[in-house]
Amino acid sequence: MVSAIMADASCSNDLDTIDRRILRELSRDGRMSNSELAERIGLSSSPCWQRTRRLETQGYIRGYTAILDRDLLGVPETVLIEVTLERHDDTVLETFGRAMADMPEVIEVWLVTGEYDYMIKVAVNGTRGYEEFLRKRLYRVPGIRHSRSSFALRCIKQGGTPVLD
């Protein structure tokens, strides 16, 4: 197991400066054409396309996605919820995980260290939308002992994965 982790950590060493530039540009705009990408990084189109496909095949690029406007979709508020479970047996963990995956309001779920077991990020329509989420969704999940919530006032930075030099 340790060797697998070490192998995964060393994969980023296989990236050269051009690969990293490709990843940075695509993380900013995944819809740009190959010719525009090639121009931005200073390659001709064919080698740029080959490198991009290799990065996809090797798993550095896991997919492309659209960033949706939550205001226009009617769920402008972000709430961060800390959750403590009653127990940590497989049944409770699996039930909780499935329930989170099935809730459309849930954007992210993180297993964390510290006082709480999970950090959940949800998108809701104001305090009424959040109360409805709590009463009709979260509080119906078996195995939750305690939760604590904070409304996000403003997102200072939102982004993808950093591509370090």
Image: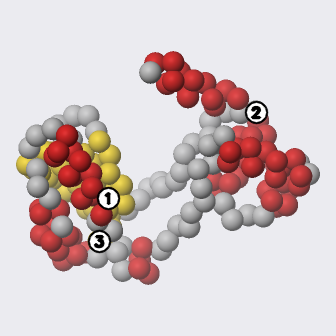
How far apart, in angstroms, are the residues tagged by discs 3 and 2? Answer: 42 Å
Q: Earlier in the sequence, mark 3 or mark 2?
A: 2
Q: Position of residue 66 (x, y in %)?
A: 56, 67
Residue 101 numbered mark, or none: 1
Q: Disc 1 and disc 2: Cα gap in Å?
A: 36 Å
The residue that appears at 47% across and 54% down in the rendered structure is: 157
Amino acid tagged 1: Ala
**Of helix, strand and loop, which one carries label 1?**
helix
Q: Look at the numbered discs 3 and 2 and tell me whether their residues touch, using CB distance below 8 Å.
A: no
List the residue tagged with mark 3: 124
Residue furthest to the right in view is: 44
Please tell me which residue lies in front, 148 or 51: 51
Q: Where in the figure is residue 87, as x and y percent of width and height?
A: 10, 40
The local secondary structure at tag 3 comes to: strand
Q: Is residue 49 left or right of residue 82?
A: right
Between disc 3 and disc 1, whose residue precedes? Answer: 1
